[in-house]
Amino acid sequence: MDLDLCGNQGLRRVIVTATSTPSTRRLLAVVSRTFKETLYSPLMLTRRATRSLIERSESSRKPSLREAKKWWEISTELYPRESREAFTMLGILAYPGCDVCDRWPPWKSSPGESPEEAERLLRSAIAAEAQGYYFLLDPAAYALDAARAELARVLVRLASGADDEQANAWLDEAEALVRGVLAHGNQAPCGVAHPQRTAAVVFAEIAIKRGPESSLSEALAFLDAVPDSSPTCRFKMKESFYRDGTWFYASAMVHKRLAGSRRDEHLEHAQLAVRHTLTAMGTGHSRAAFDAGVMAEEGFGATVDLTRAYVAYILGCMARDERAIAKVRELRANMSAPFFVALGTAHDRGILTEARVRGNETLEDLRELYLMFEPLGNHP
């Protein structure tokens, strides 16, 4: 019997049953984790991680991400060649991104922020053998595409801080990976991971960085091929939209670039860029608010609206977008009537409440500034 799989009550029941008669006492064997190499099988480990993640425990009534992570780590230690699913899920945890259902609560609190560790884990997932046991990423080909798409996403992130030679090598590899995934079309059966969506978004990011226009057109075609929504998931998760905030933001940035290069189609691309940026901002995408502000300030795809632009910049500060923070500090140093109106609008919408600005130096300063001019009776 495995102590890791048995609670105290279960263990007591087994001991009482096993020691009730002399003939059964000799059958009792309590196996500790030190003997896990001979007891744990890849099937059991993968199943146990899945159950930890998708089922509610009797004590907490919440899925246990920490428990699932423990079982995946044990699986990769004991059976590295048969643990593609475990390596992939650990890689996602190490540097979470759009490939995991953002409506699935356990992933929202994931503490991972290590693209280097994610790269190591995802390369191990790709190198693992197809034979193995799959639950969340079944079948094996789906798991492989998920690992490839996630690795490409991580490589693009690593390339942003590397020298030109290394960055180009990583971007070349990332492009090759996502092209391979996109060639397979949509094969995500339940919404745990979305290789096609991730690959399309990554390809768009590469095209925006590198150009030329032909690559942008190809990126737009890949993005448009992503389905609007996913099928019902068999793992008790809420329905996940394939076109999430990352999809809308990538589509917006591609349309924005195409609007600048295609004069005959400028208005159409500009309007789609604005619409998709606002949709991405509505989903909470961390960089969309600043871009929405720039569009409103410049009159890109719409009329100039400084108040709306400045409110968007303030929202970008909530998401801790460094571009929005720099812009708001500049506006704060050169105070204007539209900016003060935007402060009032943000205050009235509950953006500058004490609870929401706490710990955010930029927003705390804006709240203090606005309240200096507000009658005391209007302070929340």
Image (cartoon, grey):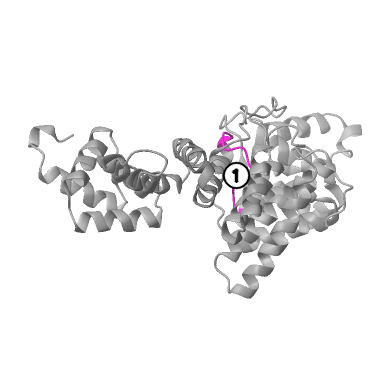
Q: Is residue 338 left or right of residue 135?
A: left
Which quadrant of the structure image shows residue 160? bottom right
Q: Which residues are magenta?
A: 94-105
Q: Of 110 and 103, which appears nearest the observer?
A: 103
Q: Of 71 and 235, which appears nearest the observer?
A: 235
- At x 57% / y 32%, what residue is drawn? 62
Q: Identify the image quadrant of the N terminus.
A: top right
Q: Main secondary structure of the magenta part?
A: loop
- At x 79% / y 50%, what residue is drawn? 84
- Residue 171 image offset from top left, x and y in percent: 66, 63
Vertical position of residue 198 compared to residue 54: above or below? below
Q: Identify the image quadrant of the C terminus.
A: top left
- At x 26% / y 38%, what residue is drawn? 346
Q: Is residue 87 visible?
A: no
- Residue 326 image offset from top left, x and y in percent: 33, 58
Vertical position of residue 275 compared to residue 80: above or below? above
Name, please, the residue furthest toward the front: 264
- At x 68% / y 43%, what residue is drawn? 222
Residue labelled with disc 1: 98
Q: Of 18 and 110, which appears nearest the observer?
A: 110
Q: Is residue 347 visible?
A: yes
Q: Is residue 320 left or right of residue 114?
A: left
- Residue 366 image offset from top left, x and y in percent: 22, 49
Residue 101 part of the magenta segment: yes
Residue 21 part of the magenta segment: no
User: Label 1 sits on what residue type?
Assistant: Cys
